[in-house]
Amino acid sequence: MVPLPAGPSDPLGRVSRVDAEALLAGLNPDQRDAVTTEAAPLCILAGAGSGKTRVLTRRIAHRVATGSAEPHRVLALTFTRKAAGELRGRLAALGLRDGVAAGTFHGIALAQLRSRWLERGETEPQLLDRKYALVARNIARRPGRREVNPLDAVAEIEWAKARRIAPRDYADEALHHNRRPPLPAAEMAGVYERYEQEKARRGLVDFDDLLVRCERALVTDPQFAATQRWRFRHLFVDEFQDVNPLQYALLRAWLGDRGDLCVVGDPRQAIYAWNGADASYLDHFARHFPGGEVHELRDNYRSTPQILAVANAVIGDREAGLPLRPNRPAGEPPTVVPFADDADEARGIARAIRDAHGPGRPWSDQAVLARTNAQAALIADALGRAAIPHRVRGGASLTAQPEVKQALARLRRARVPFDVALADLDAEVSGRFPEETDEAGATGDDDPAAGADGQGAARRDDEGRQAEQRRANLAALVQLGRDYRGLDPAASGAGFVQWLQAAARAEDAGGAGDAVEVATFHAAKGLEWPIVHVAGVEAGLVPIGHARTSEAEAEERRLFYVALTRAERVLRLSWAAERTFGSRRSRRQPSPYLADVQAVLGAFAERRRPTDGLAEVRRERRRLAATDGTGHRGRGARSPASLTADDRAVLDALKAWRLEQARAAKVPADVVFPDTTLEAVARSRPADVAALLALPGVGTVKANRYGETLLGVVARYAEG
Ligand code: ATP
Ligand code: MG
């Protein structure tokens, strides 16, 4: 951010009038309008990187500078502590060092409740920061049926509370919202009810109760409401698309009958619906806040036109809103790089990071983004091995997950050698959960509960998101255990725990220093880096395997869009043709979303002028509609002059793949395959090794060495 002259401030922290003008510097006319308008309530609706957060912070500073708001009466709300910290940093850069309160809904609610408890001489209730144990004891044993994991029930209770659904209404609402509770809905409602009763009996409150109680107190106690509303008069919310009904109710209670509210958000980045968030508060702002005004921003200042074209293509016209309009100079087209397996991918990313690092190009210019915490942990591990300073951002770290903690405790206590204990854990992870979703949709035949009549797939559906996440976390732990075992000849459970702790400390230590950021897509929201590596762009991860409803799938696409729009200059996507989950190797296919990416990259390869990305997507869809949906797969050879846009897109992917192979083997690219062979592959799209062997320049040695991953690159185009 461009530092602005902070200017002298009066005792209230107000900056002088002269600075009000300076606060409008570096804003386009729409942004200026959004900063200066007197409209209230005000909603700023705009795409990624269009300056929403910039406008929000400038608006706060500008109102303070012009005297229309007192800094001590400003409340800026966000959804995570990290985001609140970022906001504070940006406000400080504008000269508002203290005074303005920036915090999360939970943080502010707790502070207000504390002062209320104190004033009324009430003892503070104990805060229950983990629901797990209390929920677990309320789940009845189910003889003959699959055990319920309490974490699934916890997630369900949190969803219900976010939606303000009482236990008695849970069953109806769960049905209405297409939930897949881990227990029959009526039983789930019982678990929820007993959890609430026991919590009340023991005088405990959980995090959601803080919001519930604060809202209740504001609505029922006029004195308390008056005090809080006197304290905070000007309310601002960033990322408003992620507000849930409970937070919304609290916001309304804070506001009372006043209208001094400004929210900013982007419906295309709504990624917490699974958690109970509801973007319709943003979409229908004027309906929720009659008399409110909506301002839109269309210009993106973050990313190159090439990156925006890809992002626009991925979101397409599926969501309301206009494509992002670029303002930065042209850059290099994003790349899609396939790797033979996940270890190769992690090493490849480490290599690319090192190549891009240099004088004037600090580590902190780069980030690696992944869909799951488990992937992030493995990538962090690979960066550690490559001696690349890094830190893992946001989300709970792998070792903070309850199932990982439990597994670590068992490893530490185990009376058998570490190898054996790790192998046991591995077997358990591989056998306990159903097979990872793969392109063929096959279930593991080692799962005794899987029926022969497709019930396995139905039950797998029911297992849901948390089960898959837990399995992935444990599988990642097993893999880290193997890494550790390779380093410590006297490997033990206790040694493993220490090793993990040391790694975590190293990550923390990187906090202030120059380091590559490793984050999940969710944790990357709102942030930006010059160079972004998006890892694991595979079916089963992007979108995640459990996203089976159209709503869940749409949310996954938005999540991928969030990841893509974090990049400023360079965007590098990768996927692995094989991935290890515990001891199981799973064949992978590229993400179906890559079809839209490749359509745009194909256009770049033809050296057409970069467009907003939508034209290519529409053309690609028309092409697929006009064919049998399988593109040109299996056609006979055509003349060299007839490389189509699609062929070129395949050729580009093949060349990127060849480059990785060549680098890994430290040989010139054309030793892997000459251009003529790759062109022949791009044209004829062989479906199997036999077809590959029929092409010029491919012998059995090369077919054995490269066939599988090369066919993986080609296979994506068979999906249509
Ligand atoms: P997101 O949706 O990802 O949260 P956002 O809309 O909040 O994005 P910002 O983070 O505020 O966008 O801005 C994106 C980047 O563009 C930042 O680096 C910001 O400083 C820069 N920026 C915003 N507006 C302008 C402008 N008018 N001129 C130059 N740079 C700008
Ligand atoms: Mg933002």
Image: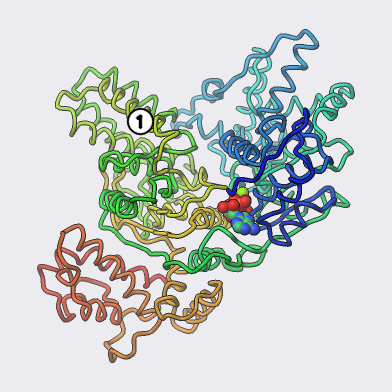
Circle 1 Cα neighbour tier, 10 Å, few/some/many (<14 / 14–19 / ≥20):
some
Give me the residue at 66% from left, 26% from top.
193
The x, y position of residue 265, in whole percent, is 67, 51
Residue 113 vs residue 452: left or right? right
The amino acid on which the numbered mark 1 sits, given as a three-letter code, is Ala
Secondary structure at badge 1 equals helix
376 vs 29, nearest the viewer: 29
Residue 440 vs residue 226: left or right? left
Residue ID for mark 1: 506
Residue 203 vs residue 680: left or right? right
Specify the color scheme: rainbow
Give me the residue at 76% from left, 47% from top.
20
622 vs 85, nearest the viewer: 85
User: From the viewer's perspective, is residue 143 above or below residue 387?
Assistant: above
The x, y position of residue 11, in whole percent, is 77, 28
Quarter of the rendering containing residue 165: top right
The quadrant the C terminus occupies is bottom left
Q: Total of numbered circles in the picture?
A: 1
Is residue 569 visible in the rendered image? The answer is yes
